[in-house]
Structures are given as C-alpha cells and as structure tokens.
Amino acid sequence: MKKLLPVLSQNKEYMPITNKSPILIFAPHRDDEVIGAGGKIIQTMERGGKVFIVYMTNGTKKKELTLIYEAEAKSALHVANVAEQNLIFLRYELGSLINPKIAKDAIAKIEDLIKIIKPKEIFVPAYEGGNKDHDMTNHIVFRALKKIKNPRIDFYEFPEYNNHISFKNLPKKTFKKITKHTPFKYTFAPEFILIKGYPTLHLKMTERERKLKKEMLRQYTTSNSNDALVKSFCFPDRFRKYPYYNYLKPPTHRMYYDDSDQISFNDFKRTIIKLNNDK
C-alpha cells in the first residue's frame, strides 16, 4: 500500500488564481516542466492562455536519444494541448550548463526569448543543490531577467528534491529508516528549502487535473519504468516567488551532486565567479 504523505503546515498558502498569459517555463531536462509545473500548464491552457517551454539541455550524452526525448516531451505537452511550436529545444548537452561559455551563451539566448515571448509569468526549478543543470538553469534565467529589468514579469520557482522533510523536521533518509518496517510506503512531495519571507504557494488542482498531470508524466516512457515517475511526482504543483539567492553560497549543506557526478559546489561557484567577472 502506498500512502502519499502531505507536508504539514500551519499556514498553508495558495498560488493566486490568475489568467496571466503567456507563461514561460524553463526545464533543464524533458519532464522537469511537468514535474514542477504540470498543473499550471493544464490550468493555463484550459483558461485559454498560452504556454511556452524552453528545454535547456537534450537530457542525454547519447545523441541518438535526443530526438526520442524530444518526441516524449511533445507527447506529454500534447496531453495539455500545448502547441508544438511553443516548445523550444536549446539542445545543450546534458551537464554542460556549468561550463561558463555555455552558460553565457544560454543567458543571451534566454534574454532574446523573453523579449520575443513577453511572458507574464516565468517558472524555473529552485536552486536546491540537487542537480547542477537545475541550479544553473535557475541562475541563468535570473541573469537574463536581470538584464531585461522588467518588473512586470512574475518570477516563480518550483522544487524537485527533498532536502528536508518538514514532518518532524526529519531528513528523508532518517524518516525512511524509521518507517522501513511499517506496512506503508511513503512518497514525499518535493519541498523547498525554507527561506523566511518566501512561503510555499500550493496550486489547487482538481482530481481531473491531477489525472491529466499523471498522463503527461506517463508520456516520458524512458524515465517511467514501473510508473516510477508518476508515483514520485503526482502531487499538485508548489511554487514560491524567486527569493534572490547568493549563488556564492550553497543552498543547503546536503549537496546531492557532490557525489553523483564528480561535480562539487566549488565547480558551480567557479562558474558563478567567472560569469560575474565577465559582466
């Protein structure tokens, strides 16, 4: 039996219901746009709005998989009736955004895209230390917006990792050990690293909208073995206003990518310093 464990909150706040359009979502890899903002995509389209999605990387180091991954993205967004011409594939190689030259090129391209699309709202993955492409996407979009200086664009981020569990403030691994011998399997919704003054905004989604989000996730067949993607990310969307990070400091002491792919926070920091010096 699987039990979806809600994060306990004394003062739950909700994402404002608006008809702002177009919206622009940045996905480091195909599937991130549905994981983080699938509900927002569905609701915007059903209210007659426009959705644009920029895929930062091709999601792979195997070129033969690029078109397969892009086809999955098109199928997923077709479920929500997003037009294919609104899907923009930048095709940077997986993991390459941490390269200062590529990051600089991406900033320029995104600045141009924002000027062309003129979004009312922008959504990016949070800066959370879970994946270098996610963190670099957050920073790259921040820099592009800073150049444009348009205060009329609402800038939001969404979580994709569990850096902590607010239920009793237990780390995920600790909580899993405690619940290992229970008859339930707990699935945790992604959570933000808490920052004072920037509350989590929960998106109210109907059961029908949640089913549509699951159907979108199921289109990513190469990532969804045994429905794993759906089981891990079937929750209603969560957002918060972009909190203006100090990127020279790690977002949390638990940096997942330190061990996973030989990239440390110091590598990330060197890229930020290089971009700062190249102003």
Image (cartoon, rainbow, N blue to C red):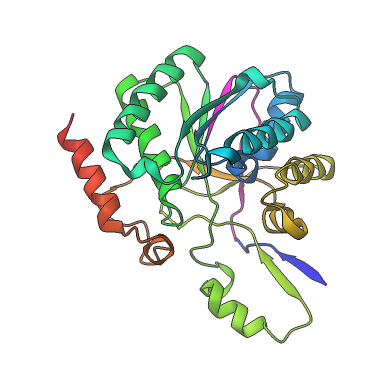
Task: Report the predominant secondary structure element of the magenta stretch.
Answer: loop
Q: Which residues are magenta?
A: 10-26
Residue 187 appears in the rendering: yes
Is 242 situated left or right of 121 in this image?
left
Q: Nearer the viewer, residue 52 or 190?
A: 52
Residue at 40% x, 32% y: name it.
141
Name the spot of residue 176 as percent of width and height, x first: 61, 78
Specify the quadrant that holds the N terminus: bottom right
Residue occupying the far front of the picture: 64
Q: Residue furthest top?
A: 116
Q: Quadrant of the C terminus?
A: top left
Query: Which residue is drawn at the image coordinates 58% and 43% (left, top)?
Result: 32
**Most extreme residue toward the bottom, as rendered?**
181
Percent across and percent down for residue 58 are 52, 37
Please say if 105 is above or below 85.
below
Residue at 74% in and 84% down: 182
Q: Is residue 95 left or right of residue 105?
A: right
Q: Is residue 19 magenta?
A: yes
Looking at this rendering, what residue extends furthest in the left direction? Answer: 277
Q: Is residue 2 magenta?
A: no
